[in-house]
Image (cartoon, helix red, strand yellow):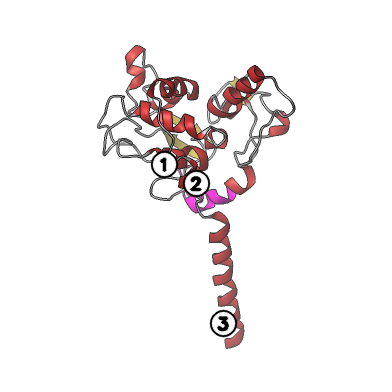
Amino acid sequence: MRRILIALALLAVLGLGLFWAATRPRPIDPDLIAGLVPDVAHGEQVFWAAGCAGCHADVDAKGGEKLILRGGQRFPSPFGTFLAPNISNDQTAGIGAWSALDLANAMLRGVSPEGAHYYPVFPYGTYSRARPQDIVDLRAFLATLPSDPTPSQPHEVGFPFNIRLGLGLWKLLYLRDGWVVSGDLTAKEDQGRYLVEALGHCGECHTPRDALGGPDLTRWLAGGPVPGGTGRFP
């Protein structure tokens, strides 16, 4: 009996080790952005193309208010309610202390500076196709925006969805390299694909999702219900 218990304990430890290895956060290789020189003017173009203000500014923000990225918008879903964080230039409440590498890890891998998984309500599933130069440029532009001391609020997510390590399994299932639209494209078509499938993350709202919240790419851009709300995305 004692041997059986020891064997079961060893199997449990092995299983936990394999689970950790499969689901651990995986930051990018720092060499991916090393040596890239930021272009602030282009970073502003990236900012608007990526829709940062749409989630991180006040929902009714207008004009210059769209550059105050204090967060706070609520996004209900079947898994709980997610609250947009402060990504202003505040050194404590926002991301003022972030490096370009921190932003690249967040956008390309869904990994925080502390090495934790982000929830995919932050659309890294599509931002993962962004060009490293665009991320470096975006970081430079974000550094020019106003600071705001409003603290980020915690997500309202219960068990088991509050176990972030499990998001590694979600990433294994749904994070994919490559494009949805393939084939030979003209330069303009290629740029359009980049805006739709990467920076613009159009499919994040306009593609139906399955029971685990992953995009159903067999119905890409086919529309679907608004998560946790009423109406439909076209």
Quarter of the image for the N terminus: give it: bottom right
User: What's under tag 3, amino acid-wise?
Assistant: Ile
* C-alpha separation, residue under disc 3 versus residue under disc 2: 38 Å
Of the pair 60 and 65, the residue shown nearer to us: 65
Q: Which residues are magenta?
A: 157-170
In the rendered view, does 192 fall on the left or right side of 25? right
* C-alpha separation, residue under disc 1 versus residue under disc 3: 44 Å
N-term-proximal mark, 1 vs 2: 2
Give yes or no for contact between labels 3 and 2 (Cβ–Cβ under 8 Å). Answer: no
Mark 2 lies on a secondary structure that is loop
- Name the quadrant containing residue 178: top right
Q: Is residue 167 magenta?
A: yes
In the rendered view, does 65 fall on the left or right side of 109? left
The residue lying furthest to the top in this view is: 63
The image position of residue 204, as x and y in percent, is 57, 29
User: What's under tag 1, amino acid-wise?
Assistant: Leu
User: What's under tag 2, amino acid-wise?
Assistant: Ile
Does residue 19 sit above or below 199 in this rendering?
Answer: below
Residue at 26% x, 28% y is 147
Quarter of the image for the C terminus: give it: top right
* C-alpha separation, residue under disc 1 versus residue under disc 2: 8 Å
| Residue behind mark 1 | 101
Residue at 59% x, 67% y is 15
Mark 1 lies on a secondary structure that is helix
In the rendered view, does 34 fall on the left or right side of 177? left
Q: Is residue 175 magenta?
A: no
| Residue behind mark 2 | 28
From the viewer's perspective, is the residue at label 3 or at label 2 nearer?
2
| Residue behind mark 3 | 6
Give yes or no for contact between labels 1 and 2 (Cβ–Cβ under 8 Å). Answer: yes
Mark 2, residues whose alpha carbon is within 10 Å: few (<14), some, or many (≥20)? Answer: some
Mark 3 lies on a secondary structure that is helix
